[in-house]
Image: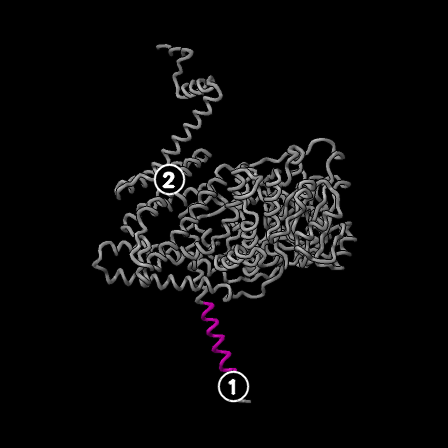
């Protein structure tokens, strides 16, 4: 057998060796030469990129090019590497920019004013979508995924932290949960100061704070709402750092341990934000029954966008679940009061002042989501108005103090809330041809297809890969459709007059006794659904009748497919307007925690929780074991060396399933209960980012099912309203006859 030839130094025999040799050649060049070579390489790459975008292709060549690039993207999707995702972004940009270049140079030959109005309207909406796509790619192409930095040194050397919990109209049952959890934060007792900032000026809250040892702060006015409340508290406290929680956001014990280390490591760090995690479903999840199966509207922001912004030193302050360095906050004049989104504006001011911001993508608090669609819309309207106010008065593209990356991140965050009008344009664009025979594209139907489809498919596939478990395909369109009509007016008014509109508080908690259909809120979706259904009828009629004009059939098919897509989206939006019952005043949190049940006869039974709330537990008992309804027992909760007993009564028992309700608990027991349940970080970490990875075809099927459900709910609500009206009218007539 021949022995392998030895490698000769200087003559590499592999690709890796050649790369090393090339690197060595670069290292031997003078610094000025390397800089010039890099600039030349960037120039050549840019020219090549734009030549690919602008070179004209005929129908066949463009079709083949699109298919080849799409198959390359599909192969890249199988890789989990960040470089593969960057390659997918490049392919997506090539296809999207080729489409827009072709669109602006080859499709705008309008023959009449009607074509021009509809055509330019659609083009502007497409340009908006392209800018959002570009900024989104830049913002999220390489998430930082920051790890915690644990505190060093003796605890008596750690800084003092003031915990601010602002409240206005929340009930005590909600606020006390947050207060107990804040007191349980793992931090030296003499360096943790918990303050309740009550703009509601309620004696009940003052008395409760006195009972549990929390500092109660109020003021004689409610000027500037939450921002003013926080600024007033800054005047009467002196901790080096401030941790802020909304009244319904329950912090975990590890909150400060996980986050404070970064402030010690980076003296210029002004703010560290953690995710807003919710243990109750929002209106989409509740009404569509998608809780924990489809990522909610917030998860994309906290799962992908914030991590991406962190790379560019542009993590946003979100008003809660955050730590802020007092010195930096006071340097910029406190929490911003000029707009109704004081949190985002404060982050922008901190960045302009040269401070760093950070994001830690580990849930360290959990709260209540908005329960009803009306409350959800009011909250989003405030966010949209506030971001438009910032865009108008403190535009991140202008002024000093921001890096280019920070400008793009802040700009994209504000631009996102301008989607109202573009979304409505996309939902009605095919009707321009079907209803008015408007030719908004002056190109053959097949040429439109070979340019449009690669643009749409690549952007969808790339976003699906980047967003993974945090946003499923097509749901973004549903979320935007529900809100588009309602944010449109406030955004326009804020751009015209930034002082228009005030701060509205988002109510949390409450019950919904009966299922009902939100007719008032659903009107825009019903109109859009009805228009697209009419468009579907027109398109089918045109296909049946046929046309002698060349290419019309393909054009009708394209508009038919677009209309069907719009029906799917608007139908799903209608489904959200069907409010389901919510009979529990307090949501139950699904969690598997080991417990013990101590019975009156002295026996002990081990069990596991299915869920918990402030009022009781759902349990799974060992096989063959059972407890009787009405039985009094002691529930023992424990974690490591901490153990507490809670008196309870069995209210449900069936086989291995049982439910217990706590007897009236002392304040000490209530505090222990919160520490052993809601304050456990592992409860939220076990759920965060654990959903199914997006599969576009599966997601489309999910949205289609929801859309069909929306149509059924609309028909059912219509029949019920008609029946109610017919029942009421005869009764009214009989009353008139008797009178």
Tell me the element at label 2.
helix
Residue in view at x 49 percent, y 52 percent:
418
**Residue 157 appears left or right of 87:** right
Q: Earlier in the sequence, mark 1 or mark 2?
A: 2
**Residue 734, label in figure:** 1
User: Magenta span: helix, strand or loop, mainly?
Assistant: helix
Q: Nearer the viewer, residue 702 or 67?
A: 67
Residue in view at x 45 percent, y 67 percent:
716
Q: Quadrant of residue 540?
A: bottom left
**Residue 140 appears left or right of 343:** left
Write down the region rendered in magenta.
716-732
| Quadrant in the picture for the C terminus | bottom right
In the rendered image, residue 204, in percent from the top left (x then y), is placed at 75, 59
Tell me the element at label 1.
helix
Number of numbered callouts drawn: 2
In the rendered image, residue 38, in percent from the top left (x then y), is placed at 44, 26
Q: Is residue 15 above or below residue 195?
A: above
Q: Nearer the viewer, mark 1 or mark 2?
A: 2
In the rendered image, residue 117, in percent from the top left (x then y), is placed at 36, 58
Q: Nearer the viewer, residue 605 or 31?
A: 31
Q: Residues within 10 Å of mark 2 (few under 14, many from 20)?
A: many
Q: Say which residue label 2 marks.
A: 94
In the rendered image, residue 54, in percent from the top left (x then y), is placed at 33, 40
């Amino acid at each position: 057998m021949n022995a392998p030839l030895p490698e000769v130094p200087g003559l590499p025999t592999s690709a890796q060796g050649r790369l090393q040799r090339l690197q060595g050649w670069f290292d031997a060049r003078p610094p000025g030469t390397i800089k010039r070579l890099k600039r030349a390489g960037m120039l050549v790459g840019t020219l090549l990129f734009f030549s690919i975008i602008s070179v004209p292709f005929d129908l066949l060549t463009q079709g083949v090019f699109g298919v080849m690039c799409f198959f390359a993207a599909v192969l890249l999707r199988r890789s989990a590497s960040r470089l593969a995702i960057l390659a997918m972004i490049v392919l997506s940009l090539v296809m999207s920019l080729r489409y827009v270049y072709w669109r602006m140079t080859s499709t705008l030959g309008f023959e009449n004013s009607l074509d021009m109005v509809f055509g330019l309207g659609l083009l502007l909406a497409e340009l908006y979508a392209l800018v959002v796509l570009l900024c989104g790619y830049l913002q999220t192409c390489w998430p930082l995924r920051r790890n915690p930095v644990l505190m060093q040194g003796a605890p008596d050397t750690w800084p003092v932290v003031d915990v601010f919990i602002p409240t206005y109209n929340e009930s005590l049952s909600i606020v006390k949960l947050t207060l107990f959890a804040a007191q349980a934060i793992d931090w030296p007792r003499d360096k943790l100061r918990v303050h309740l900032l009550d703009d509601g000026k309620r004696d009940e809250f003052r008395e409760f704070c006195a009972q549990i040892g929390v500092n109660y702060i109020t003021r004689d006015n409610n000027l500037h709402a939450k921002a003013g409340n926080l600024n007033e508290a800054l005047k009467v406290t002196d901790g080096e750092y401030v941790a802020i929680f909304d009244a319904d956001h329950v912090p975990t014990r590890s909150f400060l341990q996980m986050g404070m280390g970064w402030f010690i490591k980076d003296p210029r760090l002004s703010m560290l934000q953690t995710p807003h995690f919710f243990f109750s479903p929002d209106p989409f999840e509740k009404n569509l029954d998608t809780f924990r199966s489809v990522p909610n509207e917030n998860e994309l922001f906290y799962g992908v966008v914030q991590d991406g912004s962190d790379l560019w030193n542009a993590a946003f302050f979100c008003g809660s679940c955050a730590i802020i360095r007092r010195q930096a906050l006071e340097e910029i004049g406190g929490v911003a009061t000029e707009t109704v989104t004081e949190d985002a504006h404060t982050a922008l001011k901190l960045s302009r002042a040269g401070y760093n911001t950070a994001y830690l993508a580990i849930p360290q608090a959990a709260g209540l989501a908005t329960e009803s669609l009306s409350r959800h819309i009011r909250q989003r309207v405030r966010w949209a108005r506030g971001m438009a106010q910032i865009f108008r008065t403190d535009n991140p593209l202008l002024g000093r103090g921001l890096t280019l990356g920070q400008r793009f991140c802040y700009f994209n965050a504000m631009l996102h809330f301008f989607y109202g009008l573009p979304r409505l344009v996309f939902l009605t664009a095919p009707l321009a041809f079907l209803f008015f025979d408007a030719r908004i594209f002056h190109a053959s139907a097949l040429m439109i297809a070979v340019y449009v489809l690669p643009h749409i498919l690549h952007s969808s596939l790339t976003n699906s890969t980047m967003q993974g478990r945090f946003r499923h395909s097509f749901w973004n369109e549903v979320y935007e459709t529900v809100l588009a009509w309602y944010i449109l007016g406030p955004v326009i008014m804020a751009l015209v007059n930034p002082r228009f509109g005030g701060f509205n508080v988002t109510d949390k908690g409450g019950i919904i006794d009966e299922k009902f259909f939100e007719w008032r809120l659903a009107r825009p979706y019903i109109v859009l659904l009805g228009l697209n259904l009419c468009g579907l009828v027109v398109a089918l009629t045109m296909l049946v009748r046929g046309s002698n004009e060349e290419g019309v059939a393909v054009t009708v098919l394209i508009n038919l497919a677009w209309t069907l897509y719009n029906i799917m989206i608007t139908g799903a939006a209608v489904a959200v307007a069907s409010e389901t019952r919510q009979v529990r005043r307090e949501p139950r949190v699904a969690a598997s925690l080991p417990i013990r049940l101590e019975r009156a006869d002295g026996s002990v039974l081990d069990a596991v929780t299915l869920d918990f709330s402030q009022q009781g537990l759902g349990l799974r008992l060992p096989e063959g074991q059972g407890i009787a309804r009405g039985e009094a027992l002691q529930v023992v909760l424990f974690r490591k060396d901490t153990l507490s007993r809670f008196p309870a009564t069995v209210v449900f028992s069936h086989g291995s399933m049982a439910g217990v309700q706590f007897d009236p608990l002392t304040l000490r027991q209530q505090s222990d209960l919160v520490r052993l349940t809601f304050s456990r970080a592992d409860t939220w970490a076990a759920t965060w980012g654990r959903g199914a990875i997006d599969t576009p075809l599966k997601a489309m099927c999910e949205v289609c099912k929801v859309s069909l459900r929306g149509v059924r709910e609309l028909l059912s609500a219509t029949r019920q309203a008609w029946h109610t009206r017919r029942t009421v009218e005869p009764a009214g007539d009989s009353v008139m006859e008797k009178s």
